[in-house]
Structure formats: structure tokens, C-alpha cells
Image (cartoon, grey):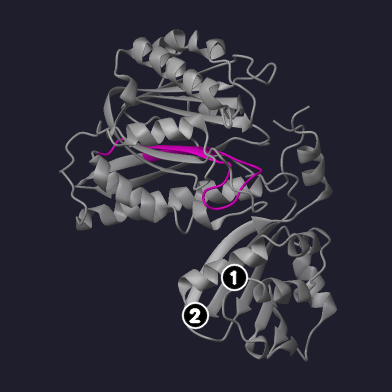
Amino acid sequence: MSGSVSPLAPKTYADMPPVRGVRMATAAAGIKYKNRTDVLMMVFDRPAAVAGVFTRSKCPSAPVDFCRANLAHGVARAVVVNSGNANAFTGRKGRESTKMTAEAAAKAIGCAENEVFLASTGVIGEPLDATKFSGVLDGLAASGTEDFWFEAAKAIMTTDTYPKVATRTADLGGVTVRINGIAKGAGMIAPDMATMLSFVVTDADIPAPVLQSLLSAGVGPTFNAVTVDSDTSTSDTLMLFATGAVAGQAPVTADDASLDGFRTALNDLLRDLALQVVRDGEGARKMVEVTVEGAESDAAAKRIALSIANSPLVKTAVAGEDANWGRVVMAVGKSGEMADRDRLAIWFGDVRVAVDGERDPSYSEDATTAVMQKQDIPVRVEIGLGNGRATVWTCDLTKEYVEINGDYRS
């Protein structure tokens, strides 16, 4: 955890009530950090339905491989997360440490190893000594409590400056269900999914295939629409669990209209967590919302928006409070998508800075500078070719980002 909390951090944190059917506990195993918790264990006392989406990196971590293999089973009894070491690019040793951890977790709560899910975050390429925390899992399994969400969020942080939590309720099958989520992430953040771990639990009774379709659809405009630095992590893991502990809920199927409220609440929670990740971007001082309209398709709009959001020159201009719209033009042009220079229009906030392929005749440096001095900066680009639209979120690129990542392993 960094020394100072991001200026973009929430002013208040959500009050996180318990979710029926899941208990949590944390421990300080000394994997990398001193004097802080670095292991989280979630225990489902009855089998929970599980869904997951993971990094698209072709060099995934050992825990990502492990989770993908177990996801087909569709049932979860335990989740073990560690921070400080990603257990990525660790070869045979990495596989051995996931096996040792899964065996210890399964033994601690009396379940099968394919009902255990693992996630690791931190340094890539360092072997993970699983003996450091496999020994604490018995105690965690016994001591877990329902009312522990905020502490759970703290235990999975790396360079994060604050824990990320969110909660929602929804009406489902005539009863009120709750959804709680935690996330971590501050650097190596880019679709698809960011160096990002997130665990979401609901007490609803939803079968695993339905849960998976909800999660796969919900991740697109949320976690897959954020970027801090264009670097896709080896370890991205987003998992959704349904404990089924709610009483009196009618069964649901994939095309059930009663799922609408739950879907809306889930997507809202995922967006909340994703934006908290961006607002904790390493060294970030400003958040940027990039909206592209008028592209050939929604997919084209998203690629153009990400080209803008990932541009170091755009992000450093934001850091310097410089409304350098020429850099936005550059990012549109290099995106690989269709664009017509003479139809482009660009806005910073409500100020149109460029139109019809040139600077707006009524351009005001003072008005634009006032927008750039804010913490939250909307950038909008009209391509003028079609109906495609997308929004992505990023942050500025500051000297602090270089400092944090220049000495990350030391």
C-alpha cells in the first residue's frame, strides 16, 4: 500500500453488510509486505455456483490456469488469494505451489480440490513459497466471519492506495438479494481485464451457466473498458459466486425476465469497482472519461477510444492540464479504424475545441484550461461516419507512475 492515498479516492466507503452463505478471514503471511495482511480466504459453507472471466494474456499465471480448469466443475467451496507475488512465469514451481495451496484449502474445509479457486497478485517471475500460507489456512477456515468485506479488500492490495468495495441489492424472484464485491488494481491495467482481481458474491440462487452469461456480458462496458497504462496483466481474475442462501427465491433461467433487476445491479456494481480501480491508477491525479461517437460500429468506437485513453501523449497532456487536442487527433488517426479528418469534432468537457477537421473558430484557451484543471475530465470525439459509440475510462500519466514502477521490485 502506497504512502499517500490517491486524491481520486472515494470520500466515503460503502457500508458492506454481510452476504449470507460466505465467510472470510485474512492473515499476514509475510509473502512480500511487512506488517499487513496478504492472504484472504473465502469459505462457502454450502457449495456455491461460480462464474469467472480471466486475462487474455498468452502468458497467464499458474492460478489463472488452475481457476480455468476448475470453472468447468461449476461449484465453489473456497477461494484463496494472496498479494505480493503473482505466481506468474514460475514454471513447474508455480504449478506445485497452486497444488499445495489447493490441497491445504480443501483439507481445511473438507471439500474437493476442484471446488477451490486461487488468485495471486504481485511480482511476476518470483517463485511463490506456498508453505508460507498453506499453514495458516486451517485457522482462516475456522475463524472466518460474514462481516469482513472491508478487511478482505485490504488483504488483496499491492500498489493500491485504498481498498475497493461496492454493494448493491436487487429484486429477484420476489425476494431481495444482495451483491457485494471487492477489487484490487492500480497498475498494469488494461483490457482485457486489468492487473486486477475482483471477487463478487451474491446470496441469490442462480445456476452457474446463467451466472457465467451474466458476468461475461457485464464485463464488457465495465472492467474491459478501463485502462491505466495499456498493459494487460498475466493475472486478471474476476469471479462471481452465488451462494443460494436467500430464502424463498423462485428458480431462474437464462432468459428469465425476473433477472433484469439483478443484471442491472450487477453491472452497476462492476462499473463502480472498475472505476475505483482507474481512480487508484498509480500516481493518478485525474480521471479521464473518453467517449467516441459516430464511428462505423461500437467495436470501432471502442478501439478508437482505447487508442486515445492509452496514448502516453494524451495522458501526459492531461497531467499537465494542457488541452492538447492535436494529440487526440493523433490517437484517432493511429487507431486502425476508419476516420475522416475533415469530419472530426472534439470536446473537452462542454468546450468544443475542434470541428470540421480544424480548430473551433470560437476556441477559448481560458475555457478549455478551466476544464483541464478539474479532477474529472470528459473527452468526447465525434467521428462523423456512423452510429458506433463507446466510453472508456483512464487516468493521467504522472512522474509518480514512473517512480512507483521504477522501483517496484526493490
Nearer-the-camera pick, 240 or 363: 240
Residue 186 image offset from top left, x and y in percent: 65, 42
- Looking at the image, the residue that sits furthest to the front is 92
Nearer-the-camera pick, 222 or 57: 57
Nearer-the-camera pick, 67 or 370: 67
Nearer-the-camera pick, 151 or 73: 73
Which residue is found at the position 63% from the left and 74% from the top? 380
Task: Assign the N terminus to one quadrant of the image.
Answer: top right
Which residue is found at the position 73% from the left and 46% from the top? 7
Question: Which portion, as a residue range, is magenta?
Answer: 179-204
Residue type at the position of mark 1: Ile
Task: Assign the C terminus to one quadrant of the image.
Answer: top right
Rounded to the nearest angstrom, the CA distance separating label 1 from label 2 is 11 Å
Residue 217 image offset from top left, x and y in percent: 37, 55
Residue type at the position of mark 2: Glu
Label 2, on which residue?
Answer: 296
